[in-house]
């Protein structure tokens, strides 16, 4: 049917969904404002974000079969849960402002931003992916990359809008922002829900036709193959979050505090570009796993150079107040490459899984694999924070307290993990043609 346009039925609704839920990564913009408004430490409120990422992965894992059966039900669940989670977060921020230090307010934020929004995140992330691959059968990587790029670009688009709202909404701007955005994002996601549709030519296999469930499909290949894909995904996210969580302080450490906002926007663009670029590039390759080898090699090379040159510690000389331009460029290069690889790891997972396990159960299998994101969300940030807090010593640069040695030490852990990932990609995840059923 002519009315069934792949852009209107797949690409646009995918962007509406992903550009909405991707704003979860704007957390750093307002986390301190929430903490100050409700009377808790920033560390206490940070768990709301960790819970959001955890329940994103867990809801995707457990609700993958719902997405598989009915994308309209799953996309509606996503719109309702994400919007209600945001509105609920706004309400409990308001309540916390009226009752400073209230445990009820803190727990309410955990439940709304972490659990309820997390369910919306997981189902919203999964819902358009299979539909995109069905509409763009010849360019599956480009299609999924486009949507997942929307998830990555959401931070760059929404961050300045949120900051402007915080600056102009006056007293209580933090909770007002959440209530306003809950309405805006519900409208966007509901529009995506209405537009999203699989091609009429696609015949969804029934149970009798499938002949086997999700776990049977996974076991139809060597089980080490799936374990390898899960571990690659998990480690790439863990390393990405470890560096990205320290990105703002690293930028300040190399004497670029004044440009931190611009660099954050550029890194978000690299994140989104990696999601689109690496997945589109993978469409030209016989084995999509090759793209992971490239991501890990690039990450190892740039991390190794910054370790070898002690780039983070030596980029800025405190005594002479001078900057080493070459080392500064290398550190920024590391930040941008890791962001691009982090994004590319996300966008290539569904297409890699479809190459290995087919399209029949792809939403359920993709959902199960996103559990790696859940666990990485709990380990990546915390790992980096622990290293920074327990190693090195605070140093003051332009009145800002930083820990150059601590940030440098994070790289020793991430390079080791990237090497492990490369070995998994090389020896554990075999090309489809080499696998025996």
Image (cartoon, helix red, strand yellow):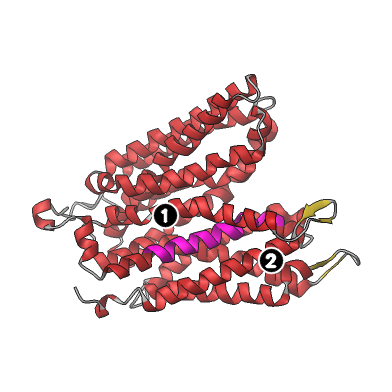
- The single residue placed furthest to the bottom in the displayed view is 434
Q: Cα distance, mark 1 to mark 2?
A: 34 Å
Q: Which of marks 1 and 2 is in front?
A: 2
| Magenta highlight: main SS | helix
Specify the quadrant of the image occupied by residue 191.
top left
Instruction: Give the magenta-colored segment's residue range.
Output: 230-249
**Is residue 247 toward the left or the right of residue 233 in the image?**
right
Q: Which mark is residue 325?
A: none
Determine the image quadrant of residue 425: bottom left
153 to 46, vertically: above or below: below
Q: Which residue is drawn at 62% across and 31% down?
A: 174
Q: Is residue 90 magenta-colored?
A: no
Q: Where is residue 148 in the image (x, y as percent from the top left)?
A: 44, 55
Please say if 313 is above or below 244.
Answer: below
373 sits to left or right of 27: left
The residue singled out by tag 1 in the image is: 147
Mark 1, Cα crowd under 10 Å, few <14 / some 14-19 / many 20+, is many
Front in this rendered view, residue 383 or 208 = 383
State the SS at label 2: helix
Whole-percent x and y of residue 350? 34, 60
Residue 77 in the image: x percent, y percent? 34, 36
Q: Which mark is residue 408?
A: 2
SS at mark 1?
helix
Residue 193 placed where, x, y %? 34, 40
């Amino acid at each position: 049917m002519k009315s069934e346009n792949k852009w209107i039925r797949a690409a646009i609704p995918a962007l509406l969904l992903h550009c909405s839920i991707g704003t979860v990564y704007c957390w750093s913009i307002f986390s301190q404002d929430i903490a100050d408004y409700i009377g808790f430490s920033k560390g206490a409120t940070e768990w709301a974000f960790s819970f959001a990422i955890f329940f994103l992965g867990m809801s995707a894992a457990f609700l993958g079969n719902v997405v598989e059966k009915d994308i309209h039900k799953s996309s509606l669940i996503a719109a309702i849960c994400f919007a209600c989670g945001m509105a609920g977060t706004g309400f409990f921020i308001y309540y916390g402002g009226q009752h400073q230090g209230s445990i009820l307010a803190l727990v309410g934020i955990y439940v709304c931003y972490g659990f309820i929004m997390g369910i919306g995140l997981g189902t919203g992330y999964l819902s358009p992916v299979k539909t995109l691959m069905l509409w763009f059968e010849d360019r599956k990587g480009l299609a999924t990359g486009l949507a997942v790029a929307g998830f990555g670009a959401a931070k760059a688009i929404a961050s300045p809008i949120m900051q402007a709202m915080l600056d102009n909404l006056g007293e209580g701007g933090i909770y007002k922002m959440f209530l306003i955005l809950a309405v805006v994002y519900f409208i966007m996601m509901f529009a995506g829900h209405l537009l999203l549709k699989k091609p009429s030519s696609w015949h969804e296999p029934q149970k009798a036709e499938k002949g086997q469930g999700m776990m049977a499909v996974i076991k139809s290949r060597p089980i080490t193959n799936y374990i390898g894909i899960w571990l690659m995904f998990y480690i790439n996210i863990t390393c990405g979050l470890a560096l990205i969580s320290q990105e703002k302080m690293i930028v300040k450490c190399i004497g670029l505090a004044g440009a931190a906002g611009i660099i954050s926007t550029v890194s978000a663009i690299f994140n989104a570009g990696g999601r689109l670029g690496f997945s589109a590039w993978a469409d030209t390759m016989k084995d999509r796993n090759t793209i992971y080898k490239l991501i890990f090699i690039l990450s190892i090379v740039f991390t190794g150079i910054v370790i070898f040159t002690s780039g983070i510690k030596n980029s800025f000389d405190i005594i002479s107040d001078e900057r080493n331009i070459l080392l500064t460029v290398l550190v920024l290069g590391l930040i941008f490459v890791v962001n691009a690889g982090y994004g590319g790891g996300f966008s290539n997972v569904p297409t890699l899984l479809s190459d290995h396990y087919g399209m029949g159960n792809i939403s359920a299998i993709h959902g199960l694999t996103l559990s790696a994101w859940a666990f990485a969300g709990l380990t990546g940030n915390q790992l980096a924070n622990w290293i920074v807090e327990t190693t090195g010593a605070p140093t003051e640069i332009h009145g800002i307290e930083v820990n150059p040695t601590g940030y440098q030490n994070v790289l020793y852990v991430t390079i080791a993990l990237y090497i492990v990932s490369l070995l998994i990609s090389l020896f554990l995840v075999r090309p489809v043609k080499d696998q025996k059923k």
